[in-house]
Image (tube, helix red, strand yellow):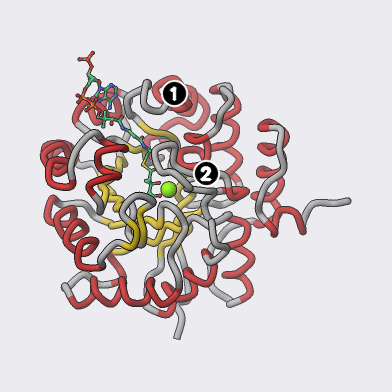
Amino acid sequence: GLPAAVTIYEVGPRDGLQNEQGIIPTATKAAFVRRLLAAGLPIVEATSFVHPRWVPQLADAADLMTALRAELGDAAAELPVLVPNERGLDRAVELGLRHVAVFASATDTFAERNLNRTVDSQFEMFAPTVDRALAQGMDVRGYVSMCFGDPWEGAVPIDQVVAVGTRLLDLGVGQLSLGDTIGVATAGHVRALVAAFAAAGIGPERLALHFHDTYGQALTNVHAGLQAGVTTYDASAGGLGGCPYAHSATGNLATEDLVWFLTGLGIEHGVDLTAVAATSRWMAAELGRPSPSAVVRALTPP
Ligand code: HMG
Ligand code: MG
């Protein structure tokens, strides 16, 4: 049967906002995070401590976390942030944060474009970062990007993805989030990938699935993940998102679409759909364009 409960890992403030053209005020980002937490989302990834020239949209990461600390107190330290390297970790440690995520690529082309590294050399950057984070008692997530297809390299062999994921787990990351960065995954591919991890000794309890909805398959892919026993799903309020360094990446699976779907299956998630949708409508007004989420549109009064 399907799992009784699922954890929704909200990435809207990070994956969603990293790709916006305009500059979003720090106070608006803080309000976004606060509203998502208030809607019951158990985990809200807040921002990235990356090079500000690479992702100018998140250049205010330290200011945002300081603002959230003032508003939320210690709860702000529980919000995960991306850190690609030791410099990023230093910035997170200075602010007393407790949850970080490193992000690897399964392909050389994307490793080069997103991290200025190769698949092999990205691990030289992650190893000391993860070591030091763990030594400080922090919790570390490991993303793998381009797990299904890569815009430059095409289909990505499953063995290559399992090899990169295994190397991240060997560094000591707790959870592995398998990213369909450009949204080309299908249910059959999801089933095969999760099975390949299981065959390598990595069970579904170590995995999260991170879908972008380019081909409209994200929910179908979640269903395949549920059938394979995966219980953590990344999603972005209103379906915001995309990666500035991945050609053809569109929005993430919308949190509202996921919530509607899980509720229909009787799977517990703890999230207030009305409150998330209201948050996405507010954010859409801030960004000046409607949410791409079908569920947000359906819940919007005429
Ligand atoms: P690099 O140029 O190789 O960096 O970039 P470097 O290590 O050579 O350092 C160069 C300079 O940058 C130095 O300063 C460093 O101090 C500084 P200088 O000495 O020249 O004055 N620097 C930093 N400054 C602030 N924060 C830092 C930092 N690191 C170095 N953390 C680097 C390598 C990794 C830094 C760069 O490539 C980068 O920032 N990349 C980030 C790209 C990114 O954020 N992409 C989006 C997130 S991934 C994603 O969206 C996919 C995901 O959603 C899953 C999925 O969908 O698949 C997670
Ligand atoms: Mg993503």
**Residue at image coords 52%, 44%:** 241
Q: Can you give x and y, in whole percent of width and height, for residue 46 in the image?
A: 45, 37
Position of 84 relative to 268 (above/below): above
**Residue under the image location 21 percent in, 51 percent down:** 173
* Rendered location of residue 263, percent (x, y): 61, 70
Residue under label 1, please give it.
56
Ligand 1 found in image quarter: top left
In front: 302, or 46?
302
Q: The disc labelled 2 sits on which kind of residue?
A: Gly
Q: Position of residue 276 (x, y in %)?
A: 64, 50
Residue occupied by mark 2: 241
**The CB of the residue at mark 2 lies under 8 Å from ligand 2:** yes
Q: Nearer the viewer, residue 196 or 3?
A: 196
User: Mark 1: which secondary structure?
Assistant: helix
Query: In percent of the image, x 31 and y 41: which residue is there?
Result: 99
Q: Amino acid at mark 1?
A: Pro
